[in-house]
Image (cartoon, helix red, strand yellow):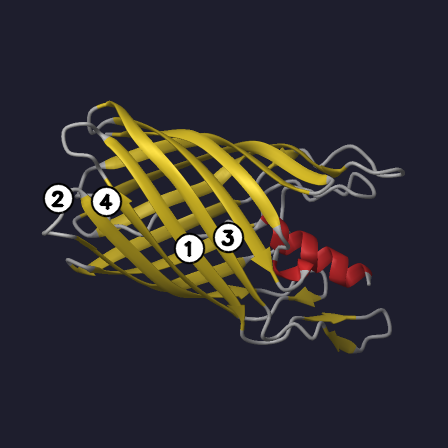
Amino acid sequence: MFKKIALAAALAVSAAFATWDYYPVLEAGKGSVEGGLYYDWHHQWSHAGLKIGARYSLIQDLELSLQSWGFQFWGETDCHGCANGGSGLRDLTIGARYQVAPMFSAFLDLLLPVGNDDNDGPGTTHPSSDEIALYLGGQFSMPIKEAPGLKFGTEAGLFWGFEHDNTERGLELHMGGEIAYTVPNVGFTPFFGLQLKFRITESTWEGEDGNEYGADDDGDHQIILWLGCGYFVLPNQLEIRGKLFVRSGDHDNMGGDASGLYVGAEFFF
């Protein structure tokens, strides 16, 4: 049971693991920095914190990024006998995207567990997944010529988490997409997105008796929906952005059910 709880916590804090966005990479020599506040909750559980990231196109068609780093203010459950805590540095994701054609990109993200993995007590969720993981796949995106300002992007990838603390999650298939519309001459962009996560192989852990046990979670899936908008305070340079998401999964070890809010800003240079 303890291993199942540990696995669930690891997946919950990494539920937002993804590429920078679903759209083409920036032009050579251009980049951006982003920072924002997040708050996720489900019944008595909640966590909140600050996420920051940066990306830069080193050469034409190659974009490098640092994602999802920052600081978690808390991660805890409000219940009798539960502890306060779950604060500390978040894990860091290093990403690379290469645009192989005008509408196609390949990506590779590496999750590094550099965050705080101290257990503050019952009911707390520490900021680190305590897991090294790879996420790789491809993207397709294009503007809609018949509707200036309208664009969409899609993504499909495999998520592979390496064994840690005698626990290894199953291989996952992630598929998602987003559609956005920038109102001409206004800089206001509403957007809507969806992602599906599907567990291909069973998660496993090694018990104290040395035997390997399965979580019987192959075939589990999770759906994440989000709705948001952005507005350029400085045209083509500084965009403020807000997003509301809901997610629903088969079991807690797919990250569980939750709702969340994110408010941030991205500065392009």
First in residue order: circle 2 vs circle 4: 4
Image coords of residue 122 (percent x, y): 83, 43
Amino acid type, residue under disc 3 in the picture: Leu
Q: Secondary structure at mark 1?
A: strand
Q: Are marks 2 and 4 in contact (CB under 8 Å)?
A: no
Q: Residues within 10 Å of mark 2 (few under 14, many from 20)?
A: few
Give me the C-alpha separation between circle 3 and circle 4. Answer: 21 Å
Image coords of residue 47 (percent x, y): 64, 37
Disc marking residue 148: 2
255 vs 54, nearest the viewer = 255
Answer with left or right where residue 265 lies relative to residue 188.
Answer: right
Q: Secondary structure at mark 2?
A: loop
Image coords of residue 160 (percent x, y): 52, 66
Give me the C-alpha separation between circle 1 and circle 4. Answer: 30 Å
* Viewer-nearest of discs 2 and 4: 2
Give me the C-alpha separation between circle 2 and circle 4. Answer: 29 Å
Amino acid type, residue under disc 4 in the picture: Leu
Disc marking residue 111: 3
Residue drawn at (69%, 44%) of the image: 117
